[in-house]
Image (tube, rainbow, N blue to C red):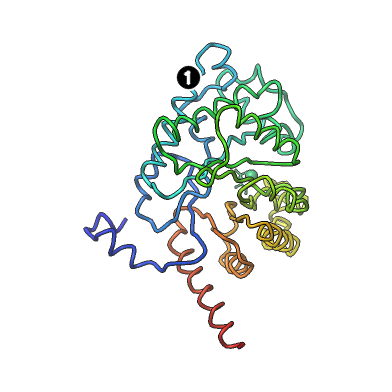
Amino acid sequence: VPASMGVSKEALTNLYPITATKIYMNLGQPDMISRYVDLPFDGIGLMRIEFIVSEWIKYHPLYLIKTGQQSLFVDKLSQGIAMVASAIRPRPVVVRFSDFKTNEYRRLRGGEEFEVEERNPMLGWRGVSRYISAQYEEAFRLELRAVLKVRDEMGLQNVWVMYPFVRTRWELQKAMEIMEEEGLRRTPDFKVWIMAEVPSVVMLAEEFAQIVDGFSIGSNDLAQLTLGVDRDSELLANMGYYDERDEALKRAIKRLIRAAHKHGKTVSICGQAPSVYPELTEFLVREGIDSVSVNPDTVIQTRRLVASVEQKIVLDKLRSR
Ligand code: PEP
Ligand code: MG
């Protein structure tokens, strides 16, 4: 990290181009923020909380509730979120609610009792369908309380939230009602995003846009479900089926951006794709995406690439006048 070479933060910032498209960073381990804090990112576009749950908390939330230890969950989760939010404020942190699959939940301590065995966990009880279910709702409330604690008690208002694996509007509305019951209301400084991972969200983007502040494309799951390819299948990947640059996916992304912008809502992307394929980043910028969220090791190159694409777009426009 150049900061350790005695270069001032101001001088560093000038090294990197300013872009109209925001460059966000994906993060899992909260303590890694100290290593990356000086990178030129505009916020955390995806904070996965699964790491905090599996490494810091270790227990299944329903087991903790059953044994009267739910405050342990709220405390550790809020601690992890606060570590990141305080290090980078006033830049935002988009905290994504948990998106373990049943087979992953089973591996948490005390988890087996609360999880069914599913044949297709990838298409099963995950994301919002968990939060609104009679079995899991109380655990979802713990996640909400952790966010509320960070925002209200710790005063870190740069924390936003994101719902993963949204399938329908009715389930999202239900989950948002639970969120309101816990005292978290959408305001201009508390944004609520949803991930666009299931094609139904893209197809009904206009309708979803009316109830959220923004979308973030989960290109890993959106590729899996648009192309009908198990994202964990090495066999299909080796045959070239799993490709986030597929035209079908590009069409879906194009459609989502148009629909969201029509309603004044933002679109981001937080799947692996732009960290791996610069040509896809170029496509996204040309289509008018508002932000791209990439892995820490590609933040700098993404910022430079996005700046050069934006410059090309301006020059092309001037030339065509
Ligand atoms: C995605 O699906 O692109 C995503 C970012 O979520 P995850 O990889 O955690 O499923
Ligand atoms: Mg996903």
Query: Foreground: 206 or 304?
Result: 206
Which residue is the site of mark 1? 71
Residue 103, by quadrant, is top right
Q: Is residue 165 above or below residue 70?
A: below
The image shows residue 63 at horizontal and vertical percentages of 58, 16
Q: Residue at x 75, y 50 (%)?
A: 199
Visible in this render: residue 179? yes
Residue 260, by quadrant, is bottom right
Query: Foreground: 36 or 104?
Result: 36
Three-letter amino acid code at disc 1?
A: Ser
Q: Residue at x 64, y 19 (%)?
A: 112
Q: Most extreme residue toward the front, as rendered?
A: 187
Report the side of 139 relative to 148 (left or right): right
Q: Most extreme residue toward the left, as rendered?
A: 6
The image shows residue 59 at horizontal and vertical percentages of 53, 22
Visible in this render: residue 243? no
